[in-house]
Each structure stands twice: as structure tokens, then as C-alpha cells.
Image (cartoon, rainbow, N blue to C red):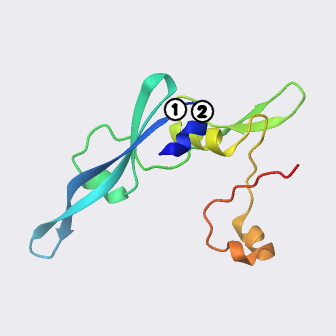
Amino acid sequence: MKVTEYDYYKHKLAFETKEWQRPILGKKKQRWNQQFSEVLAIQHFKNKKDRFNFDPEFGLFSQEKNLNGLAGLLPWYIQESEGGTKQHRPLVGHDPIGTLAQSLARQRQADFMAVSAQKLCEHFPKLEGCSYLLLQPIH
């Protein structure tokens, strides 16, 4: 993934395809169905390596070891500067997906802002169904 060339924290990403058996539960017997799931391996803070999956059943039924859980952003903390400016930040070293998102989506000295998807789509109906919105200021 070449997107990490702009990454301030220098994350290294790799997707791994894992084969596993999903149980199919019946009234009289149980069958197994062969499945494949993607696991994201992220090498980040001080070469720490974390592995995340995107399939909750894979995390529950697979025999895979060393998984950190479902991929997603953890809550960010608020850091207040001496001037009273509040900044939302991921917990570096514990939230590699958050630090990657911060590094790629934010310029230095920028801030994060949560926006209600419902309110945004009321004003901009074409954004219905969007998962992410990246805004770039025009100078």
C-alpha cells in the first residue's frame, strides 16, 4: 500500500489471507464450511506488530493466535494546549489504526471534528452512504 509513504509514524501494512472452518450448526449434526478471511498486520510504534481481522466470526471460531480483535478506531483522547486549544488524538502505541488515520488524514496543527452523518446528508443528499469524508482547505 503506497499510501503509507505520507505516513508520519511510518506504519508498515500487510494483508494476510487466512483459511478457517466456519461451523454450520444443524438440528442433528454440525458441518464445517471452508472460509477465507483477511487479517491486517500493522507494524507501528517501536516496531510493535498488531494483527486485526474484519470478520467477527473469524475471531470467534478460528484457531488463529495473536489477534488484537476487530479492526476499528478506538476512542481518541482530548489534549488541551496552553492556549486552551483542544485537540483529539489517538493513543500512540496502543491504537495503530488511529495513528495511521491521523497521520494520513490530518496535516500537522490540524484538528479532528466529528460531524453527524444524518445532519450532513440533510444538507448534502449526494453524500448518503459515504463512509469517510476528507476535506482539504482551499487557500
Depth order, front residue of 117/26: 117
Any mark on residue 91, and which? 2
Tag 1, which secondary structure?
A: loop
Query: Callout 2, which amino acid?
Result: Leu
| Left or right, residue 35 beside residue 128 | left
The answer to which image quadrant residue 37 occupies is: bottom left
* Secondary structure state at the residue bearing disc 2: loop
Residue density around tag 2, few if under 14, some if 14–19, many if 20 or more, within 10 Å = some
Q: Determine the residue located farthest toward the left in the rendered image.
A: 29
Q: What is the three-letter code of the residue carrying label 1?
A: His
- Foreground of the two, 135 or 20: 135
Res. 139 in view? yes
Q: Residue at x 16, y 74 (%)?
A: 26
- Residue at x 25% of width, y 44% of height: 64
74 or 126, which lies in front? Answer: 126
Q: Position of residue 103 (x, y in %)?
A: 63, 38
Callouts 2 and 1 close, C-beta under 8 Å: yes
The vertical placement of 10 against 71, above or below, is above
Within the image, what quadrant is residue 134 found in? bottom right
Mark 1 — residue? 94
| Mark 1 closeness class: few <14, some 14–19, many ≥20 residues within 10 Å | some
